[in-house]
Amino acid sequence: MAVENWVAKEIAALTEFRRDLHQNPELLYEVHRTASNVAEQLRAFGVDEVHEGIGRTGVVGVIKGQSNTSGRMIGLRADMDALPIKEETGVPHASLVEGKMHACGHDGHTTMLLGAAKHLAESRAFDGTVIVIFQPAEEGGAGAKAMIDDGLFTRWPCNEVYGMHNKPNLPVGQFTLAPGPIMGSVDEVKITITGKGGHAAMPNLAIDPMPVAAALLQGAQTITSRNMDPMDSAVVSLCTIHAGNAFNVIPQAVEMTGTVRTLREEVRDLVEERLTTMVEHVAAAFGGKGTIEYLRHYPVTVNHELETELAAAAAREVAGEGAVTTDMVPTLGGEDFSFMLNEVPGAMIKIGNGPSADLHHPLYDFNDDVIAWGCSYWTTLVRQRLPL
């Protein structure tokens, strides 16, 4: 019950690679340097096939085991992109790119899967095929969907697929996950309230869209408090509002944007229907017109029950029974690994990052002590799922 012995001789190089990624963050699909370095490393490791440009800038490595009597294939996924945040950590390996940083640990995720790929390519101690999936644009670009649309699972028909994400303030060497919904859907709303502009001193001659916006800001919260089952979860956050250019002019229109998060698709449907109705009818009650653009980005991330237990079993072999929990509290943060789980049975596990700033915070940094644990988890999972 510890990290595997092979990791020790790789840690220095993996740490250096991780810190280089951290210093050179790239956003969304523009991960050209990162993807190129990943592909170069995979080829150097002797990975059987390396495919670039999957879903624009994704990379897939194919590793064949000592035998393939099982005919089985499993996928292991890591994300590569950074965030448009100005780093404030002050660490020696801090971002060299102004306004961009790895504030979610994708540099660590990529590194851990690369370390595992190296060992798997060297040992081949499994029966079947492993594909390592390095994905762009998790942070809002739906890179997982782009890779799927580009033939990810038709070219490599996986029987199972697994993901791993670091979790701040969970101790290093611990893992957590749960079956069922573990992360929320991610939707975007764009609302336009159109009235009739006019002089602020003569509101009776105008149709003021501002009171409509105020009513919607408050009314939207009643969807969760008065329309939903209290046992369900959802967040409706209207986060921006833009209107007018002068202190004494009633604006012609108000534009608002926000996000909706849910843990069940049925709740997602309900929130969309109620919010759409509310925008249209509240605006009409004030004499204005309301329109909404409701954009569904990421679905709910749902771990499959069997694969959750299989992932937990691998983590227990690495970390010990007491260091793995299967009752993780769901979060309404989103994750586009959900698209992969909607195509192939699998599970996402969270790995402890130790004491740290929260994800997406300018003081966050991935903990290099986690690398050995993550590498060991991946290779243990492969050995268990594709035994010789």
Image (tube, rainbow, N blue to C red):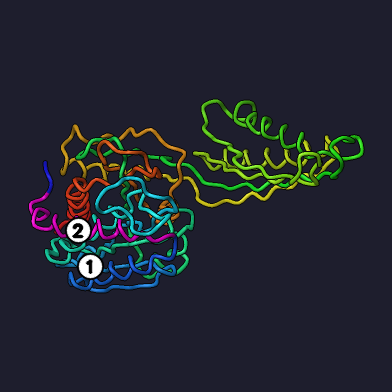
Instruction: Tell me whether the residue at label 1 lies in contact with that at label 2, contact meaning CB atoms closer than 8 angstroms.
Output: no
Observer-nearest of 302 and 43:
43
Amino acid, disc 2: Glu
- Badge 1 or badge 2: first in the primary sequence: 2
Which residue position is annotated with label 1?
A: 63
Q: Which residue is mark 2?
A: 16
Q: Is residue 41 left or right of residue 261?
A: left
Q: CA distance from mark 1 to mark 2?
A: 24 Å
- Please report the residue visible at 73 percent of the width from the left and 40 percent of the height from the top: 279
Please name whichever residue, 253 or 306, is drawn nearer the observer in this view of the structure: 253
Considering only vertical position in the picture, is 223 above or below 154? above
- Residue 76 seen in the figure: no
Secondary element at tag 1: strand
Name the kind of residue labelled 1 in the image: Ile
Q: Looking at the figure, which quarter contains the N terminus?
A: top left
Q: Tell me which corner region of the image, top left, top right, bottom left or bottom right, holds residue 220.
A: top right
Question: Is 187 contained in the magenta span?
Answer: no
| Magenta part of the chain | 4-27
Identify the image quadrant of residue 74. Answer: bottom left
Q: Nearer the viewer, residue 63 or 251?
A: 251
Residue 56, image x and y in percent? 44, 70
What kind of secondary structure does the magenta stretch mostly adopt?
A: helix
Q: Give the foreground label among 1 and 2.
A: 2
Q: Position of residue 28 (x, y in %)?
A: 44, 60
